[in-house]
Amino acid sequence: MSDTAQHDLIQRAAERLRNSQRPAVLTGAGVSKESGVPTFRDAVEGLWAKYDPMELATPGAFRKNPKLVWDWYEYRRGLVRTAQPNPGHDALAALESRFPGLPVITQNVDDLHEQAGSTNVIHLHGNIAESKCFFDCQGSPTLIDVSQLEWDKENGPPACPHCGRWVRPNVVWYGEMLPGDQLQTAMLASQRADVMLVIGTSGLVSPAASLPGVARHAGATLIEINPDYSAITRIADIKLDGPSGEIMPRLLAALGD
Ligand code: APR
């Protein structure tokens, strides 16, 4: 795409966003890529290269080998812990000055949107920095602050201080239901939106992938930011080709004051 064509598309997207009353945002792993956080499928490098992530991120895998799964998440937590928000996260957070309480629905389990300053982040797939009782013995979720626990890390996950059974990462595994309250909030935000920014998602994993369609069905304009084609592109009204760390600041600048 020529620079002129892309410039015109960004102007068009900015114009539509400027006239928006109730925008919403859906993000995926692509928005954290420029922060050095590998996507779920990339997070099997080095020692973890021989594993299929789909065989690590399931309740069955955890039951079969809690230490292996816990150690993989400790490895991924280490990657996220050192990551910083990138200009894409920052531009999204800056949008809140124009749209207070802008709902940022994310499939990501990192907290980079929060670190950048977004205040209304809806985590559909959980938060990798948090842990909970595998059985949610005190109610869903039974969050556990593992920094307060002592245990032999060679043996894998700590024991839940309430029931003595396993502690696990507070993320949604394959085959599990999404946190109902988060999904309902995301669905409502998608139904109310008059513009939805869809940033850095392949649009392959439901129910998150259905939210742009829900917004569009309710009359929203879909603006997608992704360097590649995705399952959302065919229903996007405006497709901005490029990395979010580059496109989002340009969109914010085009919005003006
Ligand atoms: N800026 C914007 N988008 C990018 C960038 C970037 N710099 N780099 C890559 N992308 C795009 C890719 O083109 C792809 O479309 O981000 C998307 C990432 O797709 P996935 O890795 O499938 O991530 P996501 O859509 O969030 O996956 C959804 O599936 O991996 C599981 O549970 C995991 O939450 C995750 C879910």
Image: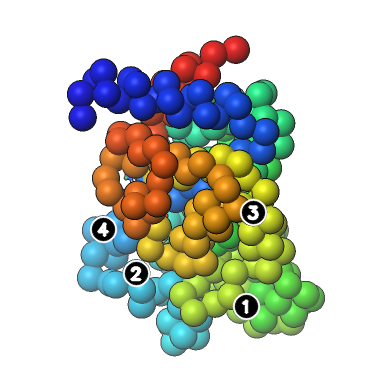
Cα–Cα span, label 4 and label 3: 39 Å
Residue where numbered disc 3 is placed: 191
Badge 4 element: loop
* Nearer the observer, 252 or 23: 23
- The mark found on residue 226 in the picture is none
Q: Residues within 10 Å of mark 3 (few under 14, many from 20)?
A: many
**Label 3 or label 2, whichever comes before in sequence order:** 2
Q: Is residue 243 left or right of residue 61?
A: left
Residue 23 or residue 242, whichever sits in front: 23
Report the disc number at residue 134: 1
What kind of element bears circle 1? loop
Query: Which mark is drawn over residue 53?
Result: 2
Task: Identify residue type, mark 3.
Answer: Gln
* Mark sitting earlier along the chain (2/4): 4
Is residue 38 visible to the viewer in this orientation of the structure?
Answer: no
Cβ–Cβ below 8 Å for labels 2 and 4?
Answer: no
Question: Ligand 1: does it lie within 8 Å of the C-beta at label 2?
Answer: yes
First in sequence: mark 1 vs mark 2:
2
Q: Quadrant of residue 199?
A: top left
Q: Identify the residue under disc 4.
A: 45
